[in-house]
Amino acid sequence: AVALVLGRSLAGAAAGIALGALASLGASRGVAHYLYGVRTWDPGTYALAAAGLVAVCAAAAWLPARRAGRADPGRVLRAP
């Protein structure tokens, strides 16, 4: 149960990160003059931002996943 909850949470996070990376690549030309010392497409920056977001999403999903893993399936299904 824990792996299922974490997997679904991180799958949604990965989709959001991919769409956000594509959007940021498209918007990078508009903000290029605000960036100092960083190229508009810096792979290290994108990778660090993506890794940070994955870490935050995993930490946010861990508590509900842990609670779901401890629940008794029979008792949950019988609850009104």
Image (tube, rainbow, N blue to C red):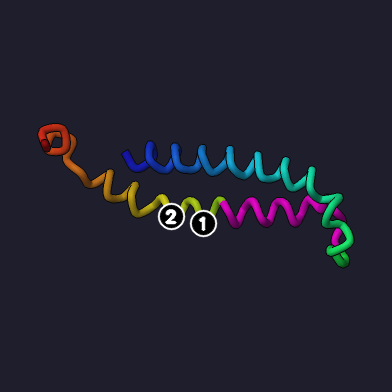
Q: Which residues are magenta?
A: 38-53
For the point 62% across and 44% down, which residue is it? 17
Judged from the image, the secondary structure of the residue bearing numbered disc 2 is helix
Q: Disc 1 on helix, strand or loop?
A: helix
Q: Are marks 1 and 2 in contact (CB under 8 Å)?
A: yes
Q: Is residue 75 above or below residue 34?
A: above
Up-down relation of residue 45 to residue 21 (above or below): below
* Percent position of residue 75, x then y: 12, 38
Residue drawn at x 78%, y 50% as measured from the top left: 43
Tell me if 42 is positioned left or right of 73 in this view.
Answer: right
- Mostly what secondary structure, the magenta segment? helix
Q: Could you tell me how far apart the alpha carbons at marks 1 and 2 are, in whole angstroms?
A: 6 Å
Is residue 39 shown in magenta?
Answer: yes
Q: Is residue 80 left or right of residue 45?
A: left
- Numbered circle sitting on residue 60: 2
Amino acid residing under circle 1: Val
Residue nearest the viewer, comparing 67 with 32: 32
Query: What residue is disc 1 on?
Result: 56
For residue 27, side relative to residue 2 (left or right): right
